[in-house]
């Protein structure tokens, strides 16, 4: 019994060690990598599941284009024929047949043109998916960067208010200030800690968003990215009409219109005559009946002309359906142009507004920071009350939060403007 219990303990110990080793290795793998915006964008484009989906669609469209072109090529077949006489094999004949078929209305060329446009549509859809991913990724990255900066500012504010509380307690013990000053300092510290917890939750939310866009790859923005990045300044407004005409979304809808025009022509060619040409040559003959055959081993050609007389109205209604789809595509083209114009105008106005807000918040932060320094100096010299200092601290914290948020808005709105113009990093 004792040896059995000892064996069970050893097994449990080994199991515990294996679990510990596993989790330690996992924790090592899950360490997030700090990356710049350029590196984050590269990782996201490599790992994004949504982008991979559109890339696979490009491969499918490319294969469809190759298949459409195969109809214009000569096909070859090898065939072996066995003749039976009274239940027994009498002869074998093997040969090769080359065949080629074409539609007199140019149906093959229309099918290839339609497949080529579909391939170009897939490429544009991939680019549009890139633009959408770029907008979402830049939103997540710069919000995470700003949340990091806000969190560090909150940490600094906690340190300052802890020092202020320590000073208030010391003065209270010396009988210089009443106990109310200590309570106020404690309340201000609690408020700063609550603000820190809220900002931490916001940062983790944007970290999770960034991780999801990167296909659940653990990446984090550089801690110093917010301080190092320059605010992008742009004075010239976009060329609205030029952007709309060359924007990938509008180009995609234009291709859909062109493809539907080809589909209308294809539908009209449903009753077109068709010519099939084939050539056959026997390669070998064996057996009694093949020996007596007068057929020589040389090429024999055959041409067939097919003229459809009636298809029960299939062509008529196919044309009607194709024209309806063409009208829908044209309407969607106009709708997409209006949407791109609206998004571009909105993005430009948001960017200009964000720039103005950033300039004013930066100036206000400089003034409030100076005011805070003067307030603390006056308090240390006994020329102002604790309420003045607490009020200055609160105004500084609010001004710093507004500054961080304003700078983040400029970065995000500039990325949105890039996406609206169809530009990628």
Image (cartoon, rainbow, N blue to C red):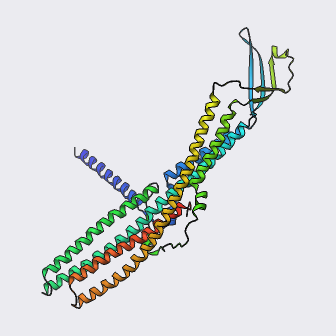
Can you give x and y, in whole percent of width and height, for residue 192 in the image?
26, 72
**Would you identify the image quadrant in which residue 201 lies?**
bottom left
Can you give x and y, in whole percent of width and height, for residue 292 in the image?
85, 14
Q: In this view, does 16 lie above or below 318?
A: below
Can you give x and y, in whole percent of width and height, for residue 311 in the image?
65, 25
Which residue is depicted at the point 61% across and 57% down?
Answer: 245
**Would you identify the image quadrant in which residue 270 lies?**
top right
Q: Is residue 113 above or below residue 296?
A: below
Which residue is depicted at the point 25% across and 48% down?
Answer: 6
- Horizontal side of residue 389 vs 214, given as left or right: left
Can you give x and y, in whole percent of width and height, for residue 359 in the image?
43, 76
Q: Can residue 119 be seen in this view?
A: yes
Residue 264 or residue 79, whichever sits in front: 264
Which residue is depicted at the point 42% across and 62% down?
Answer: 32
Q: Quadrant of the C terminus?
A: bottom right
Q: In this view, does 389 lie above or below 421?
A: below
Q: In which quarter of the image is the N terminus?
A: top left
Residue 193 or residue 25, whichever sits in front: 193
**Would you identify the image quadrant in which residue 103 lies?**
top right
């Amino acid at each position: 019994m004792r040896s059995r219990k000892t064996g069970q303990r050893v097994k449990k110990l080994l199991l515990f060690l294996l679990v510990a080793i596993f989790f330690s290795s996992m924790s090592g793998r899950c360490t997030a990598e700090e990356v710049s915006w350029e590196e984050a964008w590269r990782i996201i484009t490599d790992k994004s599941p949504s982008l991979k989906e559109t890339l696979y669609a490009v491969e499918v469209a490319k294969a469809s284009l190759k298949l459409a072109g195969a109809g214009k090529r000569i096909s070859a077949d090898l065939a072996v024929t066995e003749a039976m006489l009274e239940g027994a094999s009498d002869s074998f004949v093997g040969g090769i047949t080359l065949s080629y078929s074409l539609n007199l209305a140019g149906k093959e060329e229309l099918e290839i043109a339609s497949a080529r446009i579909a391939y170009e549509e897939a490429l544009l859809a991939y680019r549009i998916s890139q633009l959408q991913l770029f907008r979402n990724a830049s939103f997540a990255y710069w919000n995470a960067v700003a949340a990091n900066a806000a969190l560090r500012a909150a940490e600094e504010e906690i340190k300052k208010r802890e020092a202020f509380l320590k000073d208030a307690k010391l003065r209270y013990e010396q009988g210089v200030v009443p106990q109310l000053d200590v309570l106020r300092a404690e309340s201000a510290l609690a408020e700063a800690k609550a603000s820190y917890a809220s900002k931490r939750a916001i940062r983790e939310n944007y970290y999770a968003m960034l991780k999801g866009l990167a296909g659940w790859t653990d990446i984090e923005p550089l801690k110093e990215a917010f301080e190092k990045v320059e605010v992008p300044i742009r004075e010239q407004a976009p060329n609205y009409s030029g952007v709309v005409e060359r924007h990938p979304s509008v180009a995609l809808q234009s291709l859909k219109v062109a493809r539907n025009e080809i589909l209308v022509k294809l539908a009209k060619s449903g009753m077109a005559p068709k010519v099939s040409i084939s050539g056959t040559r026997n390669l070998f003959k064996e057996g009694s009946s093949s020996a007596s055959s007068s057929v020589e081993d040389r090429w024999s050609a055959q041409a067939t002309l097919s003229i459809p007389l009636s298809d029960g109205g299939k062509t008529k209604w196919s044309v009607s359906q194709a024209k309806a789809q063409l009208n829908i595509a044209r309407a969607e083209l106009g709708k997409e142009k209006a949407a791109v114009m609206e998004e571009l105008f909105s993005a430009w106005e948001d960017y200009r507004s964000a720039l103005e807000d950033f300039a004013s918040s930066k100036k206000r932060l400089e003034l409030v920071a100076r005011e805070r320094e003067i307030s603390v100096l006056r308090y240390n010299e006994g020329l102002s009350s604790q309420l003045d200092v607490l009020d200055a601290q609160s105004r500084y914290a609010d001004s710093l939060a507004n500054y961080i948020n304003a700078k983040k808005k400029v970065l995000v709105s500039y990325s949105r403007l890039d996406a609206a113009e169809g530009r990628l990093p």
